[in-house]
Image (cartoon, rainbow, N blue to C red):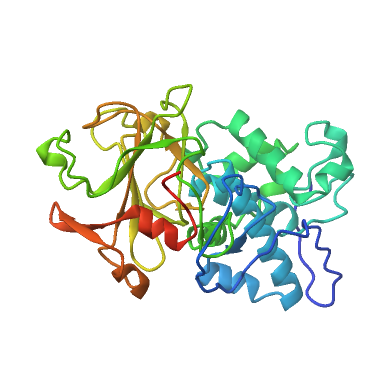
Amino acid sequence: MRRLVSVGIGAVVVVMMMLTTFVFVLLGGGQVAAACAPTATSISEGTVTVGTGPASAAYFALFGSGLVLEKKTNAALIIQISRKENLTDYSAAIVIATSLQESGLRNLPYGDRDSLGLFSQRPSAQAWGTAEQIMDPVHATEAFITAMKKNVPSRDSMSMIDVAIATQNPDTFFYYRDWQWDAIATELVKGASLQSCAVGEAHLPLDPGYHVSGSWGSNDPTYPAELKPHKGIDLSNYAGGTSAGRPVYAALSGVVIESGIGRGCSGVNTVTILHDGGFSTGYLHMNGNDITVHVGDHVIAGQQIGKIASCGPSDGPHLHFEVNPRNDKDSWLTAIPRVPKYGSYWSDPVAVMAHFGIDLTP
């Protein structure tokens, strides 16, 4: 472990040890209609725009453009891996704050004694991997998150510095006496827009192999009156096995605005995600104990948000997937058919996902 004493300002050699396919968009980008494969949750693919705010802006103003790019790139990598590991925004900020303390968000090939990498992990400690592994930012981040999950299960209710110390287990508190990273790390995570697919791409809400058990707008006579018109599409009936317990994924990147996390099978059993353009997607009938995202969390296309269950008004395990265009600002969505229900309108999810190149009806 090493304590960050100071970071020099001036000419530096920027060592970018990223996977060549890992593309970051630091200034945002336009939306395109495309699809990504169900396996596109790989952290080696994707784009990330890190968040901004007064604290982070003041911090980055201390450095030249090369160092800022290096630091933001590493922050983006940490955020994306944190999403893949289903961390809350607070836990993701802890990971970034620790790297800020230990290395200044740089993948350093040197440090106190044999410390290396984003988190100044020591090969001699035999807990983080070999020197070569520690110098791989992906491995180092995953190793830190694994240790944090194991050592600090109550991390979301603790201070960031206490979690960092419990995870890294430094020899003495001395190394963390100048901790000042909470606000910066929080801004980087909370304001992040990130996607495991390319900008504008989408992801199937379930793994392939499901069937449609209830169509959108259906007036099927077997449907109870209160379900007509059906405001979403029901996906279930995996061949050769039950649907219950199978993962549910965010179809598009966005911010969670409703979540039944921790509420079991009573009350809210929904996750609702607000997307660029103002529309939202809803994922219903999940058991709250299996939901992994909180209100305010930023999620990426392809990130697991829960599991199929049969909670609420349901006749069997399935995912009800719906699209609400209420705050739509994109002209393409106005051309998608809608049905009125519960004082709002609900777009045809098959047509919406087709816009992004996704076929919901295999």
Front residue of 75 and 22? 22
Q: Residue at (54%, 68%) from the top-left corner?
A: 55
In the rendered structure, the answer to whether residue 222 lies left or right of residue 102 reads left
Q: Is residue 274 visible?
A: no
Q: Is residue 157 visible?
A: yes
Front residue of 33 and 103? 33
Q: Residue at (54%, 45%) from the top-left corner?
A: 91
Q: Relative to 60, is 180 above or below?
A: above
Front residue of 217 and 166? 217
In the rendered structure, the answer to whether residue 61 lies left or right of residue 202 reads right
Q: Residue at (77%, 58%) from the top-left corner?
A: 18
Q: Quadrant of residue 224?
A: top left
In the rendered structure, the answer to whether residue 182 lies left or right of residue 233 reads right
In the rendered structure, the answer to whether residue 277 lies left or right of residue 45 reads left
Q: Residue at (61%, 62%) from the top-left corner?
A: 47
User: Residue 308 location, x and y as percent?
Assistant: 40, 32
Q: Quadrant of residue 147?
A: top right
Residue positioned most to the left: 225
User: Residue 198 location, x and y as percent?
Assistant: 59, 62
